[in-house]
Amino acid sequence: MLETRGLRVVGDRVLVDGVDLAVAAGETVGLVGESGSGKSLTARALVGLLPRGLRAEGSVEVGGAQIVGAAERLLRGVRGRRISLLMQDPFTMLNPLRTAGAHIAETLPGRTSRQEIARRLAEVGIDDPAVAGRHPFQLSGGMRQRVALAAALAGDPDLLVADEPTTALDATTQHEILALLRRVQEARGMGVLLITHDLRVAFAVCDRVAVMYAGRVVEQGPGAELAAAPAHPYTSGLLGALPSVERAMERLVGIPGAVPRADEVAGVCAFATRCDRVTAACTAARPPLRPIGRDRLTACVHDTAGPAGTARPPLPETALPTAPPVLRTAPPVLRTAPPAVCPAGPAGDEPLLRVEGLRKRYGAHTALGGVSLHVNPGETVGLVGESGSGKTTLARSVLGLLTPDGGRIRLTGLDVTDRAALGPRERARVHRLVQCVFQDPSTSLNPAMTVGAALAEATARAAPGDRIGVAELLELVGLPAAYAARRPKALSGGERQRVAIARALAVRPALLICDEPVASLDVSVQAHVLELLRGIGRDLGTGMLFITHDLAVVRQVAARTVVLLKGAVVEEGTTSAVLDAPAHDYTRRLVAAVR
Amino acid sequence: MSVMPGAVRLGGRARRLRRTRPGPVTLLSGGILALMAAAALFGTWVAPYDPAAQDLALGATTPGWAHWAGTDELGRDVLSRCLAGARSALLWPLVVALGTCAMSTSLGLLAGYRRGWIDAVMMRVVDLLIAMPGLLMLIVLVGVLGGGIGWAVLAMAVLFTPGDIRVVRSLTMAQRELAYAEAARTLGLGRARIMFRHLLPNIAPTVVAGALLSFVAALVALSGLSFLGIGLPAGTPDWGLMIEENRGLLDLNPWAAVVPAALVTIAATAATLLGDQLFERLSDA
């Protein structure tokens, strides 16, 4: 139904370099890759919608029609009818000025009737026909994605290309949409190409999975087999970096280095620079995708997937320049100063952070409806909740970025509920007590300042006796000292997040608030950053309030977990108790969604 | 998004080239403005004649070897007067642009960063100023105040500032919500430091482009005022005044009015284009 042969996407340089894919009717194929792997460009090339300045080469056949180089007139006949595209962002994908029904009616073949639109909505699990008359802003994210799916299916396509359809959604909604996609696909006997960065999603939903790296497919096979015995070192590296939701892992192992550009590795194995099994054969020529057993292909020259293949092939310790060793050996200056970690104050039973009955309203919306929690010195507490649960509002209240309507926040006994009421000396102390790592690495550093200037500014805020040099801070987070001269633009997402962590640690805070610090990072990078944060909690004794929507992440970092739903704490306990034996119905649904 | 933004918007090579080497538009508009600035600084020295020297016997003549752009009614050399006139034609708009930029940037940053009552009060004043018919106010105001160029420049800066305050304020409001600004607040940095060291560099491209646009608007408006006889005293070599003085000579020596008018147009166009280019290059860096 869909067949690509040697698909390349070329702009000034090669971005996608030779993708061979096939999707049969009634089959779900996953295309997995990290950012920069070229998976989204591949998706766009399939429907002939590449951004300006890029062109496709090779062959893409959809139901016998050639897409590459086809005239726009022909493509219009193919799009929607034979191949349809479902995109990531349910907020921008629908036209805000048109109703849900209008989006569907637009691509319905023949005459459109109210009944037909209602039937199409029912197909995607919307039983209320009134939804057809609503505008996108009146619908939740999950509903929008359902409407978008109905619109994508309206032309009865043979093949649906879904580009990260669940990435912007909450875990429980994500689960529902994936199940829906599967159901619709089976009912219609349609082919689905699911593009995702999430290995778990791909393995759970797809019949076959292709792993993309640096613009090419490096491995292909049935999802379950790939998960059990990966035949390419990149796939096994990704699997090793994936935090487990079932158990706390001793060590999270990311892949060292960064993804190369497709044009720089055209003639060699793309993974060679980051692989610990590299031999002369790897760089002599580009390894072709070769069959290894039934339905399986790999682009690795070695026989990696033995019969006793493990999910986590042990990568030798020596080949891993990860952060933790640095943490253990490096800045003694940081470790030999316990007073900074537990500042003098009314000690005794007083926890590091105590939040009592915190309330905040925005108009009619209650963001926080009386939340209480505490963090002990040196303890990491996970705060889990979906978007709109109030977790970020809580973080911002503790940071003093907003003033709550009611309740109390105390840091080491000091009442910091209303920052404006504090004296200058107390205020300076609070800034040294609590710091934050924010979610989005693209905005967390000032683009106009070098890394060194940003860190120097932060260290200048530390107590005079506790100042740490910029080079030491960089070393602490596993970055070379030369990075001080760089601007954020020259750093990758993971590196930026490391700098943000260094900036937060510069004043040697007793409490570090991490607001989804790894949510925007790729799996392999996420493992590095999580390991770094765990090391900081362990070796520096920094207490952490770790906000996340990802249960696997909370399992790895937090000793205790608090579950937040609609501005209220619904469950609290040790992480293993909360995740293994959830008491509240909502927690049970959350856990079920990722299992 | 997994598509590399740089790669899709513009290829890597094209980006690098644009960053290192200014394009033809930048070179041309920058060159023209540099030449005019040189005329403003040294025009009186290189001018072939004294711009004020009259030759009533000669009167208005068309361009020739002695007078490249001809002479005006009083026999004054048009080329020399244009060279000398660059000074007042460019200096006063520059003063307006710098004044507007300084006021709008600091007030806009303050309103956008502090919000609350400071913002509310400032925005109502801005609304009031924007609601006034600008040029008309200017003419009346300067007329009442005695018609000096100083008053014209001040009034113009006050009239231009409100619009720019709004722009700076809205950009500041967007920047202050970003994680780096919140991190700076979490570190307990002072307001002035956050405003000027963190937020300002990130809105600088728009501020610079805005300053050049103010320059253009002031250049044209001041020429217009000179034409109306407001601002500079009659007889001063100035492009706007020359247009006014020589518009009666269109049949004797049209160049006497056309050359200064063309200079105003060229200067304004060059500054606008340069502003565009600077904005792109600064936001790209």
Image (tube, coloured by chain):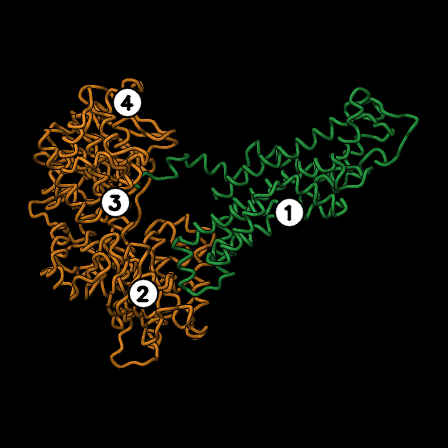
Chain colours: A orange, B green
Residue at image mark 2: A512
Q: Nearer the viewer, residue A252 or A113?
A: A113
Given the image, on which type of amino acid does mark 3 rest? Ala
Give residue B157's mark. 1
Q: How many discs appear?
A: 4
Q: Nearer the viewer, mark 2 or mark 3?
A: 3
Separation of residues labelled 2 and 4 (CA atoms): 51 Å
Residue at image mark 3: A168
Subunit that carries the residue with mark 2: A
Q: Quadrant of residue A147?
A: top left
Mark 2 touching mark 4, by CB under 8 A?
Answer: no
Residue at image mark 4: A68
Marks 2 and 3, the one that precedes in the sequence: 3
Marks 2 and 4, the one that precedes in the sequence: 4
Q: Quadrant of residue A397?
A: bottom left
Given the image, on which type of amino acid does mark 1 rest? Ala
Given the image, on which type of amino acid does mark 2 rest? Leu
